Structures are given as structure tokens and as C-alpha cells.
Image (tube, coloured by chain):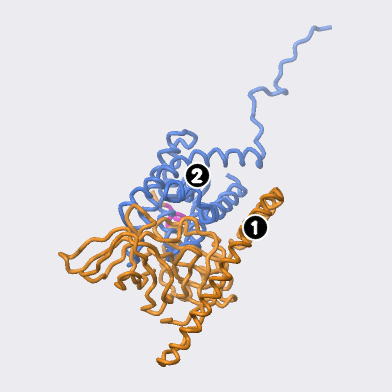
């Protein structure tokens, strides 16, 4: 994948964190804000190399924590785990299949908040936990599951718009054409 | 099978995380503000868009509607002027009596209006950020309220932005008092399912609480000045085998729809 794709992924991480903080419509409607970084990690892991995956986890995590009451850097680890594991198995995953995208999006969106909460509790912090947290976790999981294929579509569209398509090679070669003509 | 780049990536992430998590708190806070300041252009953009939308809304408001609003505001202004006159007389009387008894006179609160620019993206914290910072004279632990009641307190201050911990959050305990019975307690965490309800704990076992009683800040503890409305008692129950009681308070301020808030500059224990 191109450098442009990596830049777009990082730019999306920046904008996603801003939108999660600035727009509360979804939160007011469902009681929880969805997190777009886990679906983005799935996309990055399946479409870019390890440096992009690492950069997305680090920058996305830092952006998220800078606008949150989380300790700075705590979200980096769960995001990196998701991206790293998927990137390791990317040759075995049919990344264009909707089913694969959905399952990976669901797993990542369920894992990242749970792992972040576990790290917060391990670090002696006191996040607000109650039975309502289970609902919020479900909303985040479902939201992330739906967002993953949508992200693949969006980035596919960007890729189609901004990168040149390689010319497809045909089996036909003009220099090997048998010229048929009448002998004069 | 892991290859060398994989080990390098894992090492880099682990090292970075360990360094960041072990930074001294003030360095981490500064770093957080520095990273957060990358979003400033987007805040500006969002503010401009909001301003433009408001302007467009103003442009299409009819003259009849404006006249109606003007009349309504004029009446409200007259009412408030009369109330203010009465309050000034009460304040003068209060000051005279305080002088006679030898009590320290009350200083009036000062306010600064701030706009809520963003909410915490994580669902397990209850914080918002406002567009006032140290350049506006803000410092940690100042009370924040809106026209309905107490909203929270300032937890950290940057140059142009500050973080406010909302009431009911883990880091925002408020010493409270029930107006009708003078019972005191501490406002703690929010209800499990209804975010507009908070727990009022550490009440005496004999507290006679009934739904609808008003809860205000007691001024004990030094962070919050006394007399700011918190909410109304929703229900109460005995806990710890009748050794103490707990109540649920319906918050006056709607914390889900915060737009503008007032930061209260007051002296402690006032």
C-alpha cells in the first residue's frame, strides 16, 4: 500500500478522536460513545505494514488519551495488540470479505475497551464502573462492528480516488501477432 | 514466527508506554496538554461553524418573533430588578448583623462564562473540557455551575483549556446539605442506570428525608462555596443495618446537555 494510505490512516485517527469528543449525539442516544480506533486498527493491520500499524496505535492512543482522563499512553497497548496480532495473520485473512471484516471489527471493538479498563484497574485508577458499563461495552462493540466494513468501503473509495490503477497485462502481444494476408 | 521488525515494534511500544506511564504527574499533564493542543485548529473550525450556524439562524428569525422575545425579556428584567432590590436590602441587613456579631463578611462570588468544547471520549470517565484556562485566571478545584445548579469542579488547567470533573464522577465528591432538615452528607457516584441521579451518603441514621427536598452545597471541605443548588432528593433508605442512611439526588443540571458553564471564583468556606 502507498504512503498516501498510511497518511490517510493517521489523519483518520486524528479526526476520529476529535469527532468522538466533540459530537455527543450518539452518546446522548445510546448512553455510550463508540470508539473508531479499533476498527481503524483492523483496517491498518490488513492493508498496511507493521510501521503504519505501530504508528497508528501510538498516535491514535496518544490522541485519545490527551482528550480523556485516561493516563497518557494507556490506550496504546490494547490498540497495538489488536493491530499486531491481525497483521501477523494477514496472509491467512480474506480481507475483502464482509464476514472477515465484521468478525475482526467485533473482536477488536470488544477487546480494546475491556483491555484498557483492565490496565486502568491494574494501574490503581478508579474508572466509573457499574452494570451500565456492560451496556456501554455492548454499544461500543456493536458500533465498532458496524464501523469496520464502513471503514473498508471509505478507504477503498479514497484509494480508488487518489491512486493510479496499474494497467492490467493482457495475454495479447502485438509483436507476436500472426499477420495473415494474401500473397501478391 | 516473529521476525526482527516484530521484536523492534513490540520493544518500541512497550518502552514508550512504560516511559509515558511513569512520567511525573505534572510532566504527564503538560505532555497531555501539548498533544491535546494539536486539536486546537479543529476546535476553532468547529466554533466558527457553530457561530456561522447561529448567525444563519438569527438571520431567518422573524421580526414578530424578535419583538415577542424582547417583550418577554423586558418583563423578566423588570422582575429581576425588583428581586435584586430586595436581595440588596437583605444583603445590607446581613452585613450589618454580621458586623454586630463579629463574623467575617461574605464576599460576592465572581463568575466567568465558559463554553464546553468537548467531552471525554472514554465512557468510563465523566469529564468535559471548557475554553477557559490559566490565562483567564482559572486554577484547579474551582466550582463550576450552570443556571440550573452545580456541574462539577475544575480538575486541571491548561493555558487556554481546562478539564472539569462532573458531579457524580469518581474524583468529584461534594459536601452537601439538605435545606429543609439541615442534614449533611457527601455526594458520591452516579446511579448505575440513571446518570441524572447521584448518591448522597454519610447521612446520619436519623435523617428525615422526603422526596422533593432541596440539596445544596454545604461549603464544608473548602472546594465548593455554600449555597449552590445540587438537586432534589429522589428517595432514601437505611443502610449498614440502620447505622446510616443514603439518599439518591436528582441533579438539577442536565449534564448530558452542557453547553455553557460558569466558573465560580470564591473564597474557601464561604
Report if residue B5 lies within the magenta region: yes
Q: Confirm or deny contact between disc 1 and disc 2 (CB under 8 A).
A: no
Q: Position of residue B207 (x, y in %)?
A: 24, 69
Residues shaded magenta: B3-7
Which color was chain A given? blue
Colour orange, chain: B
Q: Position of residue A52 (x, y in %)?
A: 53, 52
Q: Residue at x 62, y 48 (%)?
A: A4
Q: Nearer the viewer, mark 1 or mark 2?
A: 1
- Closer to the camera, A83 or B111? B111
Q: Which residue is mark 2?
A: A43
Q: Residue at x 56, y 72 (%)?
A: B112
Residue positioned most to the right: A184
Q: Position of residue B27 (x, y in %)?
A: 48, 75
Callout 2: SS? helix
* Discs 1 and 2 lie in a common subunit: no
Residue positioned most to the left: B241
Question: Image quarter for residue A79?
Answer: bottom left
- Closer to the camera, A93 or B8? A93
Q: Is residue B3 above or below residue B98?
A: above
Amino acid at each position: 500500500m502507498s504512503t498516501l494510505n498510511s497518511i490517510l490512516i493517521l489523519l483518520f485517527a486524528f479526526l476520529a478522536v476529535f469527532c468522538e469528543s466533540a459530537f455527543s449525539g450518539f452518546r446522548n442516544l445510546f448512553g455510550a460513545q463508540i470508539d473508531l480506533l479499533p476498527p481503524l486498527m483492523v483496517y491498518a493491520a490488513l492493508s498496511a505494514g507493521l510501521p503504519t500499524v505501530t504508528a497508528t496505535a501510538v498516535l491514535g492512543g496518544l490522541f485519545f488519551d490527551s482528550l480523556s482522563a485516561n493516563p497518557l499512553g494507556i490506550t496504546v497497548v490494547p490498540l497495538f495488540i489488536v493491530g499486531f496480532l491481525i497483521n501477523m495473520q494477514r496472509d491467512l485473512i480474506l480481507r475483502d470479505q464482509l464476514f472477515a471484516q465484521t468478525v475482526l471489527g467485533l473482536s477488536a471493538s470488544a477487546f480494546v475497551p475491556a483491555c484498557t479498563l483492565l490496565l486502568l484497574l491494574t494501574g490503581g485508577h478508579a474508572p466509573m464502573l457499574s452494570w451500565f458499563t456492560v451496556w456501554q461495552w455492548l454499544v461500543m462493540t456493536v458500533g465498532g462492528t458496524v464501523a469496520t466494513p464502513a471503514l473498508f468501503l471509505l478507504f477503498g473509495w479514497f484509494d480508488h480516488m487518489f491512486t493510479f490503477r496499474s494497467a492490467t497485462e493482457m495475454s495479447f502481444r502485438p509483436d507476436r501477432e500472426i499477420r495473415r494476408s494474401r500473397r501478391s | 514466527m516473529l521476525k526482527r521488525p516484530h521484536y523492534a515494534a513490540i520493544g518500541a511500544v512497550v518502552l514508550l508506554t512504560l516511559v509515558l506511564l511513569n512520567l511525573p504527574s505534572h510532566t504527564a499533564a503538560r505532555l497531555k496538554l501539548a498533544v491535546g493542543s494539536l486539536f486546537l485548529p479543529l476546535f476553532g473550525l468547529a466554533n466558527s461553524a457553530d457561530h456561522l450556524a447561529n448567525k444563519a439562524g438569527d438571520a431567518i428569525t422573524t421580526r414578530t418573533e424578535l419583538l415577542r422575545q424582547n417583550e418577554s425579556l423586558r418583563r423578566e428584567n423588570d422582575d429581576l430588578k425588583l428581586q435584586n432590590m430586595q436581595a440588596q436590602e437583605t444583603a445590607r441587613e446581613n452585613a450589618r448583623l454580621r458586623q454586630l456579631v463579629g463574623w467575617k463578611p461574605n464576599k460576592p462570588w465572581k463568575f466567568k462564562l465558559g463554553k464546553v468544547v468537548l467531552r471525554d471520549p472514554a465512557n468510563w470517565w465523566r469529564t468535559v473540557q471548557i475554553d477557559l484556562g490559566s490565562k483567564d485566571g482559572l486554577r484547579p478545584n474551582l466550582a463550576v455551575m450552570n443556571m440550573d445548579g452545580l456541574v462539577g469542579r475544575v480538575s486541571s488547567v491548561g493555558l487556554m483549556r481546562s478539564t472539569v470533573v462532573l458531579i457524580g464522577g469518581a474524583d468529584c465528591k461534594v459536601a452537601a446539605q439538605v435545606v429543609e432538615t439541615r442534614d449533611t452528607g457527601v455526594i458520591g457516584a452516579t446511579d448505575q442506570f440513571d446518570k441524572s441521579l447521584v448518591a448522597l451518603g454519610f447521612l446520619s441514621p436519623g435523617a428525615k428525608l422526603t422526596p422533593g427536598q432541596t440539596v445544596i452545597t454545604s461549603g464544608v471541605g473548602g472546594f465548593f462555596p455554600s449555597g449552590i443548588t445540587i438537586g432534589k432528593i429522589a428517595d432514601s433508605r437505611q443502610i449498614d443495618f440502620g447505622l446510616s442512611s443514603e439518599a439518591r439526588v436528582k441533579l438539577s443540571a442536565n449534564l448530558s446537555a452542557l453547553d455553557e458553564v460558569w466558573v465560580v471564583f470564591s473564597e474557601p468556606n464561604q
